[in-house]
């Protein structure tokens, strides 16, 4: 029997192939220049990301390698987020090139690119094994990046913790995938959904096996997203990692985890969502994790004195808000999740960019160090305040609309189905905990504007960091008052979940 490769179209993979090759160029350039080109390597990385974005714009929808790779609206939307997060992380990193990273700049930027390649492949994966491989290519470079300050005890600790947690979560995810394959006989996500539905109707004894698969995969992806009770690594890794890497983790890695969750659960296991499928329903279990994330993330963040740890707990809470849209399981929910992640990218990357600039100058990440900053750096203080208010969900910034659309999607679902009335409680918790978040975001603004102390710091901002901050500032304001283009783009995403002919 002759072995035949499935039909493939490498044009669909052109952005991923190019970015992978560009990462090799970055490695080689740094080596050939004897690691002396401090800023050139950073600009070279930024150029590669921009070219990849252009290639993505000219790459249409279609299959790249049989059913394993499929460019659809969801893949394209999240690839934009991945490239945007990588661009902003690289742009924020110029300040640490001279001080903290002197001998391994090529490796630093190259690993960011390789992780982005993994995220992009993950976004287009249509079967479980390629999805898993994309998730691993995403996380393995991040293990190294988290520990990149190898002379810093906290950074080494962050890398070790992230490696252990990442390996454990990957094992759990792969364990759950093996159960799904055993029950369905396929790794194709759409075919798996069909086969599982047929198997469930034919055999009544698959319930416990499916429960084990669902629980182990929820644990595996829950670790990636930082959802309680799998969140313990988040504040420590955010605190110890280089600040641009922590920013990249908060957006790129989280978005990759969301894509993996959506493909496996919302698409592959959608037939098992709803009270009629109990005890196989994953919706209420995820809702419980979302409630824990919102309550724990927002309350513990109040007590933090380190701004990176505070933003780490904030990211846990933000994951809880995002999962409200996931469990809604309707067109509005899926679109709202995409818009939320897009708006969150600008606010969070912008906040982390300013924290990076401040840390480069002062060496401090303590919230108390921001006292009186509005007097010595008024522009930077105002910009940081805007980013924090967007994270809190204050109008007319993009963060407000992001939360509004997620809550509105859940309310619409609860209104249309009596069996989904529990979503009212989920929205209620979200509204209450949003008020909690105002306290710790406003605390930083209070330190900058209402402290009687004068800040001794004059904060110079490099051109790349200024560019990142400006892009983020424009994003949170522009898409807060004019969200229609992004909402229209996000509105095409539900077609990626089985609503189009395969």
Image (cartoon, rainbow, N blue to C red):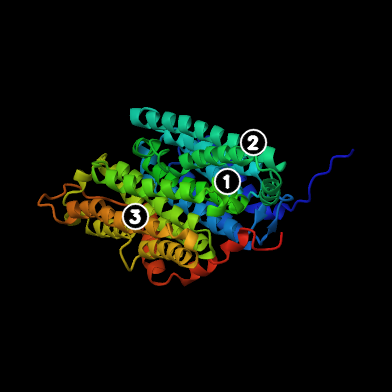
Label 2 crowd (10 A; few <14 / some 14-19 / many >=20) = some
Left or right position of 197 against 172? right
Question: Looking at the image, which residue sits at the far left?
Answer: 452
Residue 446's x, y, as percent? 18, 54
Relative to the observer, which residue lies in front, 279 or 210? 279
SS type, badge 2:
helix
Residue annotated with mark 2 = 178
Between the C-alphas of marks 3 and 2, the distance is 35 Å
Label 3 crowd (10 A; few <14 / some 14-19 / many >=20) = some
Q: Using the image, tell me which numbered label, if any, was put on residue 316.
A: none
Chain-order first, disc 3 or disc 2: 2
Label 1 crowd (10 A; few <14 / some 14-19 / many >=20) = many
Look at the picture and state if 32 lies above or below 339: above
Between the C-alphas of marks 3 and 1, the distance is 36 Å
Residue annotated with mark 1 = 117
Front label number (3 vs 2)? 3
Q: Quadrant of the image for the N terminus?
A: top right
Relative to the observer, which residue lies in front, 132 or 187? 187
Please tell me in which quadrant of the rendered image residue 130 appears.
top right
Q: Using the image, tell me which numbered label, if any, was put on residue 429.
A: 3
Residue 37's x, y, as percent? 46, 41
């Amino acid at each position: 029997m002759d072995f035949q490769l499935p039909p493939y179209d490498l044009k669909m993979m052109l952005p991923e192939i190019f970015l992978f090759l560009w990462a090799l160029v970055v490695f080689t350039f740094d080596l050939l220049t004897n690691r002396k080109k401090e800023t050139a390597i950073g600009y070279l990385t930024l150029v590669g990301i921009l070219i990849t974005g252009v290639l993505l714009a000219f790459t249409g929808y279609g299959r790249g390698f049989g059913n394993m790779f499929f460019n659809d609206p969801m893949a394209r939307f999240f690839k934009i987020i991945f490239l945007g997060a990588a661009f902003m992380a690289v742009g924020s990193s110029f300040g640490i090139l001279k001080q903290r990273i002197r001998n391994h700049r090529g490796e630093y930027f190259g690993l960011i690119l390789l992780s982005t390649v993994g995220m992009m492949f993950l976004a287009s994966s249509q079967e479980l094994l390629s999805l898993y491989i994309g998730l691993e290519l995403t996380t393995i470079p991040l293990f190294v990046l988290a520990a990149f300050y190898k002379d810093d005890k906290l950074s080494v600790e962050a890398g070790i913790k992230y490696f252990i947690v990442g390996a454990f979560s990957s094992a759990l995810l792969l364990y759950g995938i093996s159960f799904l394959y055993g029950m369905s006989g396929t790794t194709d996500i759409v075919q798996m959904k069909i086969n599982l539905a047929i198997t469930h109707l034919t055999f009544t004894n698959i319930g416990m096996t499916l429960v084990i698969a669902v629980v182990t995969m929820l644990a595996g992806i829950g670790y990636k997203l930082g959802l309680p009770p799998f969140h313990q690594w988040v504040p420590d890794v955010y605190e110890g990692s280089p600040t641009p890497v922590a920013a990249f983790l908060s957006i790129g890695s989280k978005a990759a985890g969301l894509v993996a969750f959506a493909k496996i659960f919302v698409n592959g296991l959608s037939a098992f969502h709803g009270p009629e499928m109990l005890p196989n329903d994953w919706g209420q279990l995820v809702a419980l994790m979302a409630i824990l994330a919102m309550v724990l993330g927002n309350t513990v963040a109040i007590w933090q004195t380190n701004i990176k740890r505070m933003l780490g707990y904030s990211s846990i809470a933000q994951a809880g808000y995002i999962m409200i849209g996931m469990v809604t399981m309707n067109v509005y929910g899926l679109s709202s999740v995409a818009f939320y992640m897009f708006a969150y990218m600008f606010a969070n990357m912008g906040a982390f960019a300013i924290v990076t600039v401040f840390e480069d100058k002062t060496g401090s990440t303590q919230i108390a160090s921001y006292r009186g900053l509005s007097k010595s750096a008024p522009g930077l203080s105002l910009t940081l305040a805007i980013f924090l208010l967007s994270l809190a969900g204050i109008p007319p910034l993009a963060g407000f609309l992001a939360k509004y659309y997620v809550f509105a999607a859940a309310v619409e679902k609860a209104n249309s189905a009596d069996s989904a009335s529990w979503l009212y409680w989920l929205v209620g918790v979200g509204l209450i905990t949003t008020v909690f978040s105002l306290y710790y975001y406003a605390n930083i603004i209070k330190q900058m504007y209402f402290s009687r102390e004068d800040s001794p710091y004059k904060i110079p901002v490099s051109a790349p960091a200024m560019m990142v901050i400006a892009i983020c500032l424009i994003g949170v304001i522009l898409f807060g008052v004019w969200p229609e283009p992004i909402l229209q783009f996000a509105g095409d995403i539900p077609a990626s979940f089985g609503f189009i002919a395969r």
